[in-house]
Image (spheres, grey):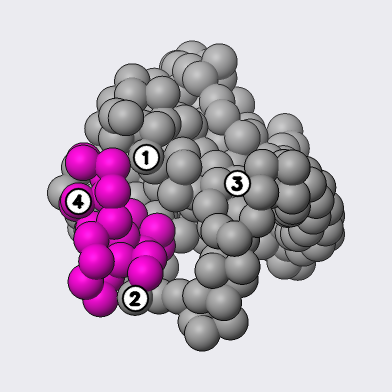
Amino acid sequence: MGIGKQIRAGRERLGLTQGELAKQLGITKSAVGNYENEVSHPKEPVLYKLFQVLGCDANYLFAGHYPAGPAGVQAALTAEEESLLSSYRRLDDYSRELVETILQKEVERCRRAKTAARRASTKIIPFYALPVSAGTGVYLDSSDTEDLEVPLTPASARADFALRVCGDSMMPNYLDGDILLVRQQEAVPVGELGVFTLDGEGYFKRFGGDRLISLNPAYPDIPLARFEQVSCSGQVVGKL
């Protein structure tokens, strides 16, 4: 069994969705899907997090089994779980099939209940894979998006999509790599933060009326008169 199948098996053993596992690992849901389908493989920092979240080590992910030591499943079983496992092993084939049928139905019921509870406290918004510049401008391609599940907060409730910050011109309030929550609108009030497209390149700046302003004083203002095409994609209402 390959590492992708092992990751999927470990995730399903814990009753986690791909999105839930991604959130605990600090990566996207599509990245988890790529790991499980073996389109790509997790890098070292993600591997260490996988060991922690799945309660396993490299023996499980790469060799397909848990060790008998403290990191393994056997060491994690409670006395009650050991008793249940012992009872299951004494059953005949008919009884085992009956237990497994009931168990699968109960796992699915719990999964649905957990999903419903999670959806009540989260929101899914489009996340643009290409970043928006907090610097000198980055080309925005509106076709490259994926779903991003975010906690339901006053800020995220107002957001229509999310973008990643690229650059340091909006420091110290916004850092390179931060994810912005954006409310889609064609204009923002003077003094507010927004996402703007200037001749095809995207900027995250403060709107100054006739110019875009960086929070980092090391960056000069950007006069809008220099550009032929100027548009506003939305107002920044928060960050993750």
**Residue placed most toward the observer, 231 or 152:** 152
Q: How crowded is mark 2: few (under 14 residues within 10 Å), some or many (20 or more)?
A: few
Q: Which numbered mark, 4 or 2, is in the foreground of this view?
A: 2
Alpha carbon distance from label 3 to label 2: 25 Å
Give the mark nearest the N terminus, 4 or 3: 3
Q: Inspect the magenta stretch and tell me whether residue 61 lies in it.
A: yes
Task: Identify the residue at image location x=49%, y=82%.
Answer: 78
Q: At which x and y percent is residue 30?
A: 48, 32
Q: Position of residue 211 (x, y in %)?
A: 47, 42
Numbered label attached to residue 6: 1
1 vs 2, front mark: 2
Q: What residue type is labelled 2?
A: Ala
Q: State the residue in front, 198 or 211.
A: 198
Marks 3 and 2, the one that precedes in the sequence: 3
- The earlier-in-sequence mark between 4 and 1 is 1
Cα separation between marks 4 and 3: 23 Å
Circles 4, 3 touching at the beta carbon (< 8 Å): no
Circle 1 Cα neighbour tier, 10 Å, few/some/many (<14 / 14–19 / ≥20): some
Q: Give the residue at mark 2.
A: 75
Specify which label sits upstream in the sequence, 1 or 3: 1
Q: Which of marks 1 and 2 is nearer the N terminus?
A: 1
Q: Mark 3 points at which residue?
A: 17
Q: What residue type is labelled 1?
A: Gln
For residue 170, the mark is none
Q: Give the range drawn in magenta.
A: 49-74
Q: Which residue is drawn at 40% across and 58% down?
A: 54
